[in-house]
Amino acid sequence: MGEGVAVRTVPVEAEPRIGFEVLSPGLFTTVQDLGRPGWQRFGVPAAGALDKYALIAANALVGNPPGAAGLEVTLLGPVLAVVSEGLVACTGADLGFTIDGQPAALWQAHRVRPGQVLRFTGRRAGCRAYLAVAGGIAVPEVMGSRSTYTRARIGGLAGRPLAAGDQLPVGPLPIDWRDRDGLALPEALRRHGLPQPVRVILGPQDDRFLPLAIERLLGAPYRVTPNSDRMGLRLSGPKLLHRAGADIVSEGVAPGSIQVPGDGQPIVLLADRQATGGYAKIATVISADMDFLGQAAPGDRVTFRAVDVATAHRLRKQRLELLAAVAEFTGTAALAGA
Amino acid sequence: MTPPVPESQVMPAPRILPAGDEAVLVELGQEIRRELNLRVRALAHLLTGPEAPAWVREVVPAYASLLVYYDPDRASYEEVQETLRALVAKGGHIDLPAPRRIEIPVRYGGDDGPDLEWVAHRVGLSPEEVIARHSRPIYVVYMLGFLPGFCYLGDLPPELAVERRETPRLSLPAGAVAIGGRQTGIYSLDNSPGGWRWIGRTDVRLWDPDRDPPFLLQAGDEVRFVPV
């Protein structure tokens, strides 16, 4: 979260080109970049791609900087008609990505021409695919980001998911875009699925729960329920019991916080979470594992294991090293500080 | 955890708690009290001013706590904790800049405040008396949250404290002024869900994403409602 983006100047075109026309929007397809950190004290969630690794990798394949905006495609994907020639790459979940009816490899750049149709034919694995296009989706920035935050109707296309008939503007093509056609990430730099267990740091309010609750959280499997969304992964499983009620005085809420309302069922808070909240939080998913939560689909099983902060920082570094390797392999800008 | 320097009998000991590996929660207390909120403000001031440590990414002030996002590439968890402990102690002794005071014109009752009559009946006062008492205090913005720009203001006079609606409204308009418990708030966004009692409305825009700065109010500001 909050990765700084290496600054790269992009020539401004008066009228952005139309890259795609939306023939069918899919279940919930939104424009996302790396989010708008810095506004949480005003109650604005950071938003941004849930699986940032996948978005950054897709951007790198088409020659974009890590923070370019792409499409986050959820479970059932859209159908898009190509309007302008260019380059696309799809990463993250396998939702049956095809170009003109032919399966198109994930984690690979593909040249596309006007008239071609991009379609997602059905989910095989994961929950969210990321579609990057050379030049990036060129919707206007709102408070420093193009990320869609639907609850406040900002970012993306008028703050809402894609709808049929939308025309998606794209930025200028990089000079070397044709050379990237077919560029594919090696297996070691791709990521699949939800690793188990997901690692957490206990707290900030683990002392508000009975010892049995901690034991259950770290011992029993939980299931992802269908009412999960970009705000949070709602889990069901053994009840987590509080010592004296679920309510706390409202406070800032970090990404990955596992809040437990009165019903004892945990909710792992994601990018569109409210910036503040009033439920006790038993633990927090470590930053290195947040990408994977974006791939947890309804029905998936999740288990948790506790680590200390030093371990989490080591794993965080490993993730940044992997992203640096993606940048190196694709010859693109790395995340600042990575 | 190291015991902090006792500052006064009434102040609880601050706790610095991990909120994942990129944030820590500085908990100065567990209740809604002006003195605690002032200490939150002092700490936020020290962490966002010119002498803020380079590892601070973002702070989120709340009633009695401050969530501090940090950059683990620039400081270890231990270093962050140590610095925060020192700053909490220092925060009790600094002179804060005077809070800004903002007047918010409000139309009370009718279509602009459909719950005014209910509130008046509930607390046993006339609607005029509810308006007079709601617009008398100088409120402090304890925090923003819930939705972009939503302000939690306190303290509401005790005689106006009412319970929230059992079924929250699905759609309040931007500018709706509402009360709940010992607090009052202003909704910043059209179609906000909300459980507080809606008594008035302002045309002042608390949030405009295209304005610079986008937000009218920040934590620590003082607010007075002016009936119009």
Image (cartoon, coloured by chain):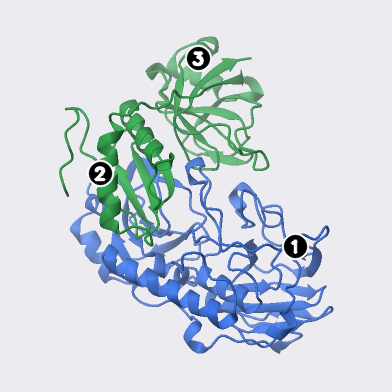
Query: Dot 3 lies on which element?
Result: helix
Query: Dot 1 lies on which element?
Result: loop
* First in residue order: circle 3 vs circle 2: 2
The disc at residue B130 is: 3
User: What hue represents chain B?
Assistant: green
Residue A193 versus residue A226 in the image, above or below: below
Return the residue at label 1: A11
Disc 1 crowd rating (10 Å Cα; few below 14, some 14-19, many 20+) is few
Disc 2 crowd rating (10 Å Cα; few below 14, some 14-19, many 20+) is many
Return the residue at label 2: B85
Q: Determine the residue located farthest toward the front in the rendered image.
A: B51
Q: What residue type is labelled 1?
A: Pro
Q: Nearer the viewer, residue B27 or B76?
A: B76
Rendered location of residue B119, percent (x, y): 49, 21
In the figure, residue A201 lies in which quadrant?
bottom left
Q: What residue type is labelled 2?
A: Arg
Q: Residue at x 49, y 68 (%)?
A: A294
Q: Do labels 1 and 3 share a chain?
A: no
Q: Which chain carries label 1?
A: A
Closer mark to the observer between disc 3 and disc 2 = 2
Residue A167 versus residue A60 in the image, above or below: above
Measured in 3D between alpha carbons, the distance from the residue under mark 3 to the one under mark 2, in whole angstroms, is 43 Å
Rendered location of residue A115, percent (x, y): 84, 79
Disc 3 crowd rating (10 Å Cα; few below 14, some 14-19, many 20+) is many
Q: Mark 3 lies on which chain?
A: B
The disc at residue B146 is: none
Rendered location of residue A177, percent (x, y): 72, 79
Q: Tell whether A270 sits left or right of A201.
A: right
